[in-house]
Image (cartoon, rainbow, N blue to C red):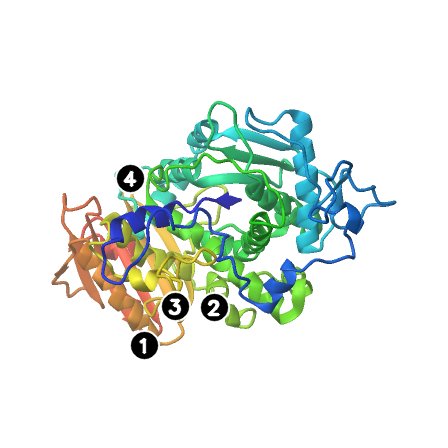
Amino acid sequence: MRRTLAVAVAVLMVLSGCAGFVGSEESTPAAPDGADDTPSSATDAADSAASTDDAPPAGDAPGSGNAMAQSPPDPDSDRLGWEGGYWYNETLSVDQSDGLNESELDTVVNRSMARVERIRGLEFEQSVPVEVISRAEFRNQSAGGGANYPPQRRAFDNAKFEALFMINESTDSIAVQNSNTGASVGGYYSPAEKRIVIVSENTTSPKLNEVTLSQELFHALQDQQFDLTRYNQSTQERHNAVDGLVEGDGNYVDWLYEQRCDGEWDCLEDSARGGGGDGLANYGPYLIQYQPYSDGPAFVRQLRERGGWEAVNAAYENPPASTEQVIHPDRYPNDTPVDPIVTDRTSGTWQQLEPEGRPNYGELGEAGVNAMLVYPLYETKGQTQIIPAQQWYNLNESGEVEEFAPFNYDHPYTDGFRGDRFVAYQNDAGETGYVWKLVWDNSSQAGEFLDGYERLLQFRSAREVRDASGPGTVYRIAEGDNGFADAFRVVHDGDTVYIVNAPTVDQLSNVRATQS
């Protein structure tokens, strides 16, 4: 899936006046998979060099001095860099000013398949249907995606984003996420349906952006070669961890493809642009989902620098087990996460939520915890920065946000993360509470996180209250302050932090007995 980089545009407009922060809407990356024009490593430089192994005859190649009156001759058998009758560097007579007809779309898809093969060194086994739709049509499709969510699953999801202080208890988190999807996705490949959908910003005659197409074609190639349906992505953390490889590889190939479109290849573009972040319903969930797109390309590039594309291919047999391994590539694959257990210690009418279609617990990971602490930066348009903007944005030498890896999900507040488990509960009045257990490498790093979390509580107007019924510190957010009115018990126990939530202070012990 290709996500447009909506977030950076909005924040650069907000923070462009901050001391030491240089940037403008024009210089902001339009997608997570770009980079500057200069290859950043010997590996990338090698990608810019021509190869003769699978190229058409030199006399027929674009840029060779020929006018390309005829296509290069087809090879005797299928080969890398040639698909459906088209070489990767052929010039096409295609005009998409009024959209692409079926034959034109097939032509562009075949050449783009050949180009993806050329870059990645993998062969397509079969072609994939491609559909181009307008942004408006895609929004309509996305909006109805959560209508039939089972009640317990909806309650669980609401509790999770409430715990992250991103979506308050009066707002439907499923609707928010579907709205974000409708605004931010530039295209997707469906492994179940074996088809690709490209989202165009043009409403009258949808057009195709070839770089977006290239990534979705590569996802189809990944599925054909590695079977994308085999991975366990049942929680947010597991989803993001695997996507660090899957989307990281896709965005890295996307970036290499885009470099060639800057001069070596002629590429189709959809000149219409989206609203640059104005269409997002809430930045918070987007920040979590975006982490593989920001860190994944660098993770894959480092794998490739270690052992070539063969090392990247091998990683599909052993994908990242945590977002920590993607955020810190040197920790892959040996720094394995822990799997904390939360024992049910409820009383009264409180019972654990058992959401249909997913595990009865959540995992947010280092990416989710980091996004939680960054989110106030977006919500307040830079007025509150628990993680400062200068530490969150990766800036290049010109002071602009890097296109290859725009965001820094590594911060002392979240470094040393080893694993978490989030469990939600509900009582017979329909109220929800939760226990969130977070484990760190040591007590000091758990304390670092606690410093950041207490700053977040302070931002949400939480007040410490006297409570002698258990360990840790109890906080209360009053009704009407910001939509997050609740009670919180925060316990630091060695390398572990427990966060217990209930509607009132008295109910904290009903959600979880006071033993840590």
Q: Amino acid at mark 1?
A: Ser
Q: Earlier in the sequence, mark 3 or mark 1?
A: 3
Q: Please, is residue 134 above or below residue 450 in the view?
A: above
Q: Which residue is mark 3?
A: 439
Q: CA distance from mark 1 to mark 4?
A: 38 Å
Q: Amino acid at mark 2?
A: His
Q: Earlier in the sequence, mark 2 or mark 4?
A: 2
> Which numbered disc covers residue 430?
4
- What crowding class fits label 2: few (fewer than 14 Cα within 10 Å), some (14-19), or many (20 or more)? some
Residue at image point 68% right, 32% down? 106
- What crowding class fits label 4: few (fewer than 14 Cα within 10 Å), some (14-19), or many (20 or more)? few
Q: CA distance from mark 2 to mark 3?
A: 17 Å
The percent position of residue 78, horizontal first and vertical second, equals 82, 45
Q: CA distance from mark 3 to mark 1?
A: 12 Å
Q: CA distance from mark 3 to mark 4?
A: 30 Å
Q: Which residue is mark 2?
A: 328
Direction from residue 73 to residue 234 in the image, left or right: left
Q: Which residue is mark 1?
A: 444
Q: Are marks 3 and 4 in contact (CB under 8 Å)?
A: no
Q: Are marks 2 and 1 in contact (CB under 8 Å)?
A: no
The label nearer to you, 2 versus 4, is: 2
Which quadrant is home to the C terminus?
bottom left
Direction from residue 92 to residue 210 in the image, left or right: left
